Amino acid sequence: MRTTVAVVNEQGGDFSLEEVDLEGPRSDEVLVRMVATGLCHTDITMKGFLPAEMFPNVFGHEGAGVVEEVGADVSGIEVGDHVVMSFRSCRTCAKCSAGLVGYCESTLLLNYMGLRMDGSTSYTRDGSPVFGSFFGQSSLSRHAIAYADNCVVVDKSLDLTRLAPYGCGFQTGAGTVLNVLQPGADDSLAVFGVGAVGLAALAAARYAGAGTLVAVDPLAARRDIAERFGAIGVDPTDASVVDRVRELTGGGASYAIDTTAIPAVVKQAQQALAVRGTLVALGLGPEEYTLDAIDLLQNGKTVMASVEGDSDPQEMVPRLIAMHAAGDFDLDDLVTTYPFEEINSAVADVLAGKVVKPLLVW
Ligand SMILES: NC(=O)c1ccc[n+]([C@@H]2O[C@H](COP(=O)([O-])OP(=O)(O)OC[C@H]3O[C@@H](n4cnc5c(N)ncnc54)[C@H](O)[C@@H]3O)[C@@H](O)[C@H]2O)c1
Ligand SMILES: [Zn+2]
Ligand SMILES: [Zn+2]
């Protein structure tokens, strides 16, 4: 079939709305008509991060839509189902069997190679392959091919334009708190970078009953939003961020999360931790971080990372929907909708800090 995608034609290029051919669904695939697709910072990073030979490429990994066709071997999904799409996992390897689907042994092949497992692409243009299958969806598109493992069926009464970011950004922030750190009332949490991921972490930390919450971000508008989740805002352009966070948390934060992917900020986040504190670095981009080795050793600190907040989307997406219904996880007004043809404006706006979570709607 023909469909319209927002394709990136060359490394670092803008998104371009173009017609392509879409092949499938094959027996293990489903065809989804997108209602809304969230833009995650990872989509923007990927445009410059992937090697030149992996373009043209269709990104998008926060798709939400309606199932239009179901392959013969797919179970658990029916035509007409509403789905929130997330990342892929094989669901059979040792990591998947242990519930750690973000660390699936086939993660790279299933999510990042731009191809199906047999080396084909679901999108072609004038007979030439267009890389796709990003997170097993490439949902910056009107229609996308997805899989039973990365489609979470949701109630049809729910607003898909609010749920799309649950598939990555919101799930990652919330999962880092609820699955990885699990803070209690005596624990403090400092979040460095309060965009979509960082704010979701703060919302989950408040829900979890964590103690002092600190939000470090140069954008005053984002610090203001963070304050709505009970966090104290810190401007990193002020003299000493590390000292300020340590002061607010009574000597250092029990936990810190970095979403900036800025090496100097990761180091600050480590230094702002209390003795035996833990930092989770979530950002994508730099190849290397530099840690304060003496501080790390003397104070027995832990620096770790997490894929999608160690979430299994089949559990985390319904959990966040239930929390939202109970009034415990309301990020609705972080979402700003744009018509799909305005995708490059959406990118510019989020990079300028004008919006938190841009959502493309057809
Ligand atoms: N680990 C995962 O599985 C996973 C999942 C989703 C996203 N990500 C990554 O997480 C990161 C955050 O994604 P996002 O969509 O929330 O991005 P975002 O751009 O909305 O948020 C980043 C925030 O960092 C702030 N910032 C910039 N400089 C700063 C500084 N010096 N100190 C403190 N804050 C500063 C920005 O103002 C912004 O608010 C990205 O790198 C993305 O690729 C990782
Ligand atoms: Zn993402
Ligand atoms: Zn697996």
Image: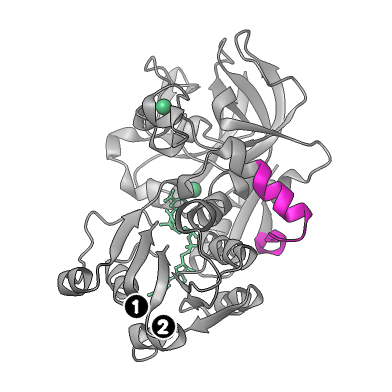
Residue at (46, 79) in percent of width and height: 218
Q: Quadrant of the C terminus?
A: top right
Identify the disc placed on residue 272.
1
Q: Are marks 2 and 1 in contact (CB under 8 Å)?
A: yes
> Residue 321 colored magenta?
yes
Dividing the picture into quadrants, the one containing residue 63 is top right
Write down the region rendered in magenta: 318-335
> Residue 179 colored magenta?
no
Counting residues from the start of the chain, the first of labels 2 and 1 encountered is 2
Element under label 1?
A: loop
Q: Nearer the viewer, residue 309 or 118?
A: 309
| Relative horizontal placement of residue 123, taking residue 283 as reference (left or right) | right
| Relative horizontal placement of residue 129, taking residue 53 as reference (left or right) | right
Residue 84 sits above or below residue 320 on the image: above
Residue at (47, 34) in percent of width and height: 99
Element under label 2?
A: helix
**x and y percent of residue 2 in the render?**
62, 22
**Ligand 1 quadrant assignment:** bottom left
Residue that label 2 marks: 245
Q: Nearer the viewer, residue 277 or 236?
A: 277
Residue 124 sits above or below residue 41 on the image: above
Q: CA distance from mark 2 to mark 1?
A: 6 Å
| Relative horizontal placement of residue 244, taking residue 40 as reference (left or right) | left
Residue most extreme to the bottom: 239
Q: How many marks?
A: 2
